[in-house]
Amino acid sequence: MEKSIQDPVHGIIKLEDWMIKIIDTPQFQRLRRIKHLGFANLVYPGANHTRFEHSLGVMHIARLLSEKLELGDEIVVAGLLHDIGHTPFSHSSERILEKYAGISHENVKRVIRGELKDILNDLGFSISKIADIISGKKPSIVSGDIDVDRMDYLVRDSHYTGVAYGVFDISRLIDKIKFENEIIIEQGGIKAAESLLISRFLMYPTVYYHHVSRIARKMYEKAMETAVEAGFEAEKLLEMDDCDALMLLKCSEYSTEYTAEIVDMIKNRRLFKRAIYVGRRSVDIREVKRVNEKRVEEELAEETGIDEKYIIVDIPPIDEIEEINAKVEVEGKILRLDEVSPLVKSLRDANIESWRMGVYTKPEFVSKVGKAAANYFGIERIVQKSLSDLL
């Protein structure tokens, strides 16, 4: 028996009976309740789509490529389950899970259990092989420099946020892909690949690293870390959805007055503000990357007399554009995409300009914390009207 789902991005997605059995498991249905973009809906009100529909989209593209390249159904299953290990608010809980439980969201063996495990075994799929595909241990179209995951999320996130940067020609790219132990893009697909990279380059600072969603994410992380230190087992995040996480922080044996306060602040969009927010022209990135965020928070708290839990130091990693290493075939030779595309090569240098570090705190503490943070990082603090004052 075959069913169809109407998807706003890909149109009709057809589901075979075995796919429906996997989708109907509690483990997969949990993804309906995990927002794909975490707290981005605080900036883009339409960004309420979930890991569920994204997973269906990835499966759809994986099936198109699998049929074209004769890769088999295991690839399709891996596409469907590639996000099964995601925790509440998507990437927002990852650091907690890795720090306290030593688990990556790509370690799907810890999640594939119970009914889902039984169904996969009954269908004859190897859980180990599927896990290796998802984690990237086994080369595939699901996890790589340019893969089906990226092909879906850029277009989907663009659609739901209303940010038009994520649009590129998926059909053309799929048509010009072949697989020889890794994805190789034929010469006729280079322009489509360039378009994907430009989309990604624009979407990261505009959507994925927008300062408001970044601040909410760091507030949530700090509150969740408080709950873990109070005895909550981080591994249980693998079984929870967004609502479960907020309830844990709001009213459970692991919640505190502080964690409940943070939940209320996030729910009512009463967020911390930027005390400082600077890029590479204001700080030496190499020096800043050596800094221990927790230690700086403690030092700023001591200097200002403000409780450490209301100070967040956020030094994100420099976003690596892995896609520039994608392989293309030009005149019979296999080369990296950045070797044949001056446009793609230029994105590597341009990308670092989007990097920002920030120190966030409650609105009433912005001036005091800002001065202390500017002094700590050696930043010449110039008074300027911040976007955070307008949002």
Image (cartoon, rainbow, N blue to C red):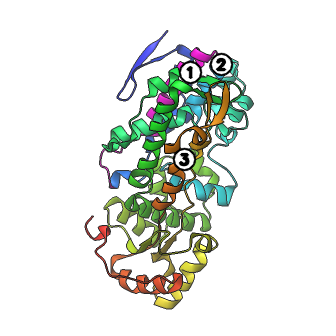
Disc 2: CA contacts within 10 A as few (<14), some (14-19) or many (>=20): some
Query: Hey, which residue is sitting farthest front in the picture?
Result: 331
Residue at image coords 34%, 40%:
160
Q: Amino acid at mark 3?
A: Lys
CA–CA distance between discs 1 and 2?
Answer: 8 Å
Asked if the stretch drawn in magenta spans residue 306, the answer is: no
Q: How many marks?
A: 3
The answer to whether residue 34 is visible is no
What residue is pinned by disc 1? 65
Is the residue 135 above or below the residue 330 in the image?
A: below
Range shown magenta:
43-72
Q: Sequence order check: which comes first, mark 3 or mark 1? A: 1
Residue at image coords 59%, 35%:
82
Disc 3: CA contacts within 10 A as few (<14), some (14-19) or many (>=20): some
- Residue 22: quadrant of the picture: top right
Disc 1: CA contacts within 10 A as few (<14), some (14-19) or many (>=20): many
Q: Camera-side residue: 201 or 13?
A: 201
Q: Amino acid at mark 2?
A: Leu
What residue is pinned by disc 2? 71
